[in-house]
Amino acid sequence: AQTVTQSQPEMSVQEAETVTLSCTYDTSESDYYLFWYKQPPSRQMILVIRQEAYKQQNATENRFSVNFQKAAKSFSLKISDSQLGDAAMYFCAYRTTDSWGKLQFGAGTQVVVTP
Amino acid sequence: NAGVTQTPKFQVLKTGQSMTLQCAQDMNHEYMSWYRQDPGMGLRLIHYSVGAGITDQGEVPNGYNVSRSTTEDFPLRLLSAAPSQTSVYFCASREGTARGKLFFGSGTQLSVL
C-alpha cells in the first residue's frame, strides 16, 4: 500500500517571500507520478505541478518548483515570490503509472500569505 | 467546455434519508471516480469506474453505491445517510492512459443532521 504524508498542517509566508511545503511517500514501485494540487477557498482542485519518477530533473511551473528526492521518497514544493492568490490548501498526491492508477492524497497543508 | 459537472453543490439531509449525487463528464473519459474530503485527511477514494458497466471499491466504500450505465455518468448513492457521511464530495475523470490528467468537478458540500 502507498501512503502520502504531509507533516505541516499550516505554513505562513509573507508576500514576495518563499515557502517550501514538505511531502513524503511510501511505495515499492520504481516508476510512478507525483503531483501537487492547489485548493483555494472556491474548493476547485487545480493541478500545480507534476513529476514523473523516472525523470531526475525537477519539474517547474513558473514560480512553483519541486525538489524530488527519489531515494528519500521526498517531494517538496517551493513557492517563490509568494502572492496573495497563492493562499490555499495544497495537497501532495501519488499515482502509479498503470492506466487505471488511483490518485492517493496527503492530508494537505494550508498556506497563509500575509501582506 | 463543461468538463466534469456535479450536482447539487450543497445538500442537507436528515439521518436515514437517501440521495444521489450526480456526476457527468463530456470528455469521453473512461475513468471516473468519487472522493470525499474531510479536514485533516485529504481526499479519500470512495469508488471508481474504468468504463461503462465496470465499477470497483476504493479506500472508503462503506455506505455508498455506484453504477456506470453510460460513459458520461457516474452517480453516487447514499442509501441511508449517516452523520459520518458529512463531507465534501468530488467527482473526477480522466482518460484511461498512464499520462491522463485528472479533471475534478466543483464538489458537493453534504451535511447529514
Image: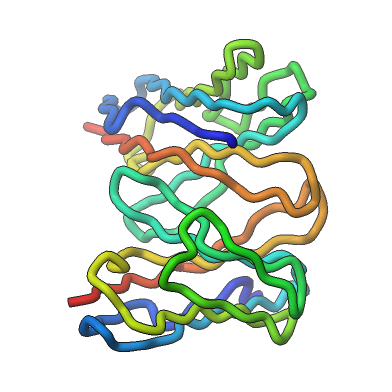
- Residue plotted at (75% across, 54% down): A100
> Most extreme residue toward the front, as rendered?
B62
Q: Nearer the viewer, residue A90 or B76?
A: B76
Q: Is residue A40 above or below residue A93?
A: below
Quadrant in which residue B86 is drawn: bottom left
Colour scheme in the image? Answer: rainbow
Q: Is residue A46 above or below residue B15?
A: above
Residue at x 32% of width, y 35% of height:
A111
| Residue A115 seen in this snapshot | no
> In this rendering, would A64 be left or right of B56?
left
Tally the numbered discs. Answer: 0
In this orientation, which residue lies closer to the viewer: A8 or A25?
A25
| Position of residue B34 in the picture relative to residue B95 (left or right) | left
Please report the residue visible at 62 percent of the width from the left and 60 percent of the height from the top.
B103
- Tell me residue A44's x, y (percent): 45, 59
Q: Quadrant of residue A42?
A: bottom left
Percent coordinates x, y for residue A50 in the rendering: 65, 36
Q: Is residue A72 left or right of residue B94?
A: left
Q: Locate the N terminus of chain A by quadrant.
A: top right
**Quarter of the picture holding the C terminus of chain A:** top left
Judge by depth and name the residue closer to the eye, B103 or A13. Answer: B103
- Residue B83 appearing in the image: yes
Question: For this rendering, which residue is in front, A101 or B23?
Answer: A101
Q: Which residue is at 46% across, 73% downward?
A: B64
